[in-house]
Image (cartoon, rainbow, N blue to C red):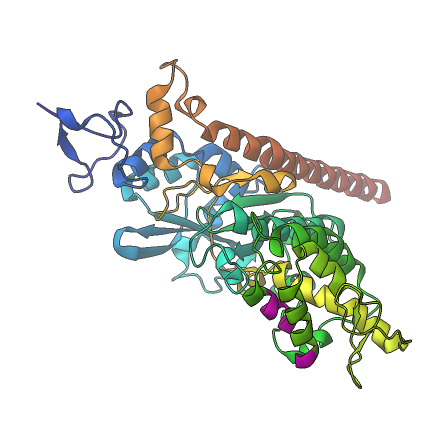
Amino acid sequence: KKTWINMGSAILDNDDVPRQDDEDVLMSDHAVEKKKDDPVFSIELLRLYYARLFPYEEMCGWLGYEEGGNSLLSKREFVFTLEDEVWCRYKSFRDAVELKSAMLKEMPRKIDLGAIYNVSPIEHKVASNFKPQIRELVFDIDLSDYDDVRTCCQGATVCRRCWRFVAAAVTVTDTCLKEDFGFTHRLWVYSGRRGVHCWVADKMARELTNEARTAVINYCSVSRKSDASCGDDLSWPMHPSLQRAYDILEPIFEQDIISGGHGQGHLAEPELWTQLLQNCNLPTDIAQQIAEHWSSHTSTPIAKFHGLKELIVDAKTAPKLYNTSTFALNNKKSKVANSDQIANKLWKYNLIFKYIYPRLDENVSKQRNHLLKAPFAVHPKTGRICIPFDPDKVDDFDPELVPTLRDLAEQIDAAEDPSAPDLDKTSLKSHVDFFQNSFLKPLQDSLARERRNKNRQQADQNAATQLDF
């Protein structure tokens, strides 16, 4: 006896689910029991997810930005990456039913989203002036960009220790978007592997030109040079947004970057603190004295960093050290010029920003037509779902606990109430609810207010015209 297997009892037997012989797996009954080494990503698991769990209605409710009763969904570009990295651009759909049908038929391994164009993307070859008109302002943070300062992992590998770089970047960037630009509708999404994405859906953000997007990303970024000119990146007095970022980042720097144990250990080991001293742009002889003192005297990483704060560098003449009892390098106290005092303030900002200021992928944010992985898509390397998360709780986010396709299938199998909706049987339910309640509903309410205001203004204009007549 043979049976179609899709992770235990979570078998796809719906008549409306398309099947292709080369994508279904025919197995004997003895293989029904799940094994620990089952893959987290497979075509069967993906089909289960697309057929029974993917939030089509919620996604289309967002991506269409209904205006005046008309959805713009049909003008939104979808990009499917199929098996063997076959890339299909300029796809579009009129509603959630069409999107689901296409995803079940084509089984995309990856889903990216583009802009809303002036015509349907499928007409891009025949349209005379095909161009993007509306696009969320998007940001991309990738942990691989921190490989020069990560000591626990490299490349695509991620753990809770290095996730602190992402948490710091999310906190600083989200605060900037909220307080400096006033953006309200911000969706943060885990990328499924080693990073996060942010979608800003406010009307003003969606309508930004490429030039304006470039200005925003430049505002949110700082140079992180590693050469001797790094001290020239900032000036005093510090811009309020950078001062706010420093106030956020300094405690994280002390706890998670310089400390050992659960931190990155940049002031816990000689090789690492030698590099950190170089990043302070200190003269070689002074940096060597400090390193030698640290090697011969026991002190905590935080004590070392507080000692560094007592250092003043006079870039014009010779280095001057004062009040340096922590280092015991120079017992003479000397007065320093105002330029020295400014230099003393700036090096701390440059050092901390060089290690943990948000490293945003600027190219992702600058262009309206840049593609970005869709929320609730699946990462084919990890099988993890690209789930939305609360930026205010990013410190508690653990990428290793993000549900995988296999997790969801097992949760459906283990559900106590077989009659419950499939989504309710899984941990994905809370993430879909968060998306709907914290992002989609407030956004739709905002769009409704805009329509009412527009209609009211039109009615007032019509009334004024009739009175004039």
Left or right of residue 204: residue 45: left
**Quarter of the figure with residue 467:** top right
Q: Quadrant of the C terminus?
A: top right
87 to 2, vertically: above or below = below
Examine the structure image and report whether residue 278 is included in the region drawn in magenta: yes
- Can see residue 236? yes
Picture quarter with the N terminus = top left
Please name the residue shown 41% across and 34% down the image.
Answer: 54
* Magenta span dominant secondary structure: helix
Q: Nearer the viewer, residue 315 or 290?
A: 290
Task: Please give left or right for residue 243 compared with residue 294 in the image.
Answer: right
**Which of these two is toward me, 226 or 362?**
226
Task: Say whether residue 265 is magenta.
Answer: no
Identity of the residue furthest to the right in this view:
335
Count of numbered tags: 0
User: Percent position (x, y) of residue 42?
Assistant: 27, 41
Q: Nearer the viewer, residue 375 or 56?
A: 375
What span is colored magenta in the figure?
273-285
Instruction: Name the quadrant containing residue 53.
Output: top left
Percent from the top left, x then y, of residue 15? 24, 26
User: Residue at the spot x=76%, y=58% of the render?
Assistant: 241
- Residue 378 x/y as whole percent: 39, 43
Furthest-front residue in this view:
296
Q: Is residue 149 above or below residue 263?
A: below
The image position of residue 421, as x and y in percent, is 41, 20
